[in-house]
Amino acid sequence: MLQRQYLTSHVETECPHRKVDCQYCHITGEHQFIEGEHKKQCPKLPLPCPNKCEVGSVPCEDTEVHRKECPLEMVQCEYHNVGCCEDWMPRKDLNKHNEEKTKEHLTMTKSQLDSALRQLNNLMVLMHQLGDEQEQFSSTGGTPSMVLAANWIVKLEAMAALCKSGDQTCPVVVNFKQFSKERKNQKVFFSDSFYTHDKGYKMCLHVDPSNITVFLQLMKGPHDDELTWPLKGKFEVKLFNQISDCEHHSVIYDDCNPAGRVTVVDTMVSGLEIRNFISKEDLHKVTPTCQYLKDNCVFFQINKL
């Protein structure tokens, strides 16, 4: 209740239920709603840029769109997925970074492409082996044995591991082909490089087939400045039994020989070594449930414990 002389002023300027328009999105509603609940979620409400760029303020609904264009938004190098380890930088500095690092980016991209092609080739080998075994089984008209079923499971698990190893972090599965032939030629095998974990130590698996010596060799990596040296820890190297999901040959490296930091690019040090990883007799043995060397191929898995 109020005096008549104040009614017009109250209705036009004071009443919380008076009808008003939002100054930003222009919808109409009661004053208490527009200035209260609506103002907190108005899509056109101007908000300051989170990065305080020269644009000043942007409508609330456009904030995320603006951040994708804001020159001061912190972004990663577009090539971080292939190994560029530069710190986050303002978007305005990205072009300069790309111009300065063109050669390094091309080298990293080529390395990743080569790795992807090798993984694809390994997958094709596994698929070919599965196809041959399935065709052989179908021609006999019999039912699959437990050994054959287990053999397929092992190969499918290896294929899954290869598919998941795009960023090459442990656990990693590597495949060495023509193993017996290369041993006669006194050739050693090197796997693609991989990492112990995301942004971890860079390594590769080195196998000398002449005496079946296995090395986990450390390489210079992009994250070395952020890691603790010397490298310590336990690693498992497993040689897959290719016809059954059992009797895999596994050896664990311990902390007795910590590996030091590599300071020169594209060099390796013998960080962790197992001599006589497996005897030649065991490597070549063939039983109804166990075969490590099959179709002249071997599969190793490396895992950080």
Image: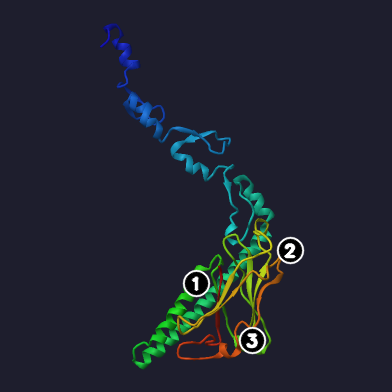
Q: Quadrant of residue 225?
A: bottom right
Q: Residue at x 38, y 88 (%)?
A: 145
Q: Which mark is residue 265?
A: none
Residue 87: where, in percent of width, then height? 63, 51
Closer to the camera, 200 or 155? 200
Q: Mark 3: few, some, or many residues within 10 Å (few <14, many ≥20)?
A: some
Amino acid type, callout 3: Glu
Closer to the camera, 12 or 160? 160
The first of marks 3 and 2 along the sequence is 3
Position of 259 with respect to 1 (left or right) is: right
Tell me how the rendering is colored: rainbow
Q: Which residue is tagged 3? A: 182
Label 3 secondary element? helix
Q: Which residue is tagged 2? A: 263
Q: Mark 1: few, some, or many residues within 10 Å (few <14, many ≥20)?
A: some
Position of 245 with respect to 175 (left or right) is: left
Relative height, residue 62 to residue 210 (above, below): above
Kindly report the distance in space between the C-alpha atoms of the residues bearing marks 3 and 2: 31 Å
Label 1 secondary element? helix
Position of 85 with respect to 58 (left or right) is: right
- In this view, the mark in front (3 or 2): 2
Label 2 secondary element? loop
Q: Quadrant of the C terminus?
A: bottom right
Q: Quadrant of the N terminus?
A: top left
Q: Which mark is residue 161?
A: 1
Amino acid type, callout 1: Ala
Q: Quadrant of residue 193?
A: bottom right
Relative height, residue 74 to residue 16 (above, below): below
Amino acid type, callout 2: Thr
Residue at the farthest front position: 256
Q: Residue at x 53, y 77 (%)?
A: 122
The first of marks 2 and 1 along the sequence is 1
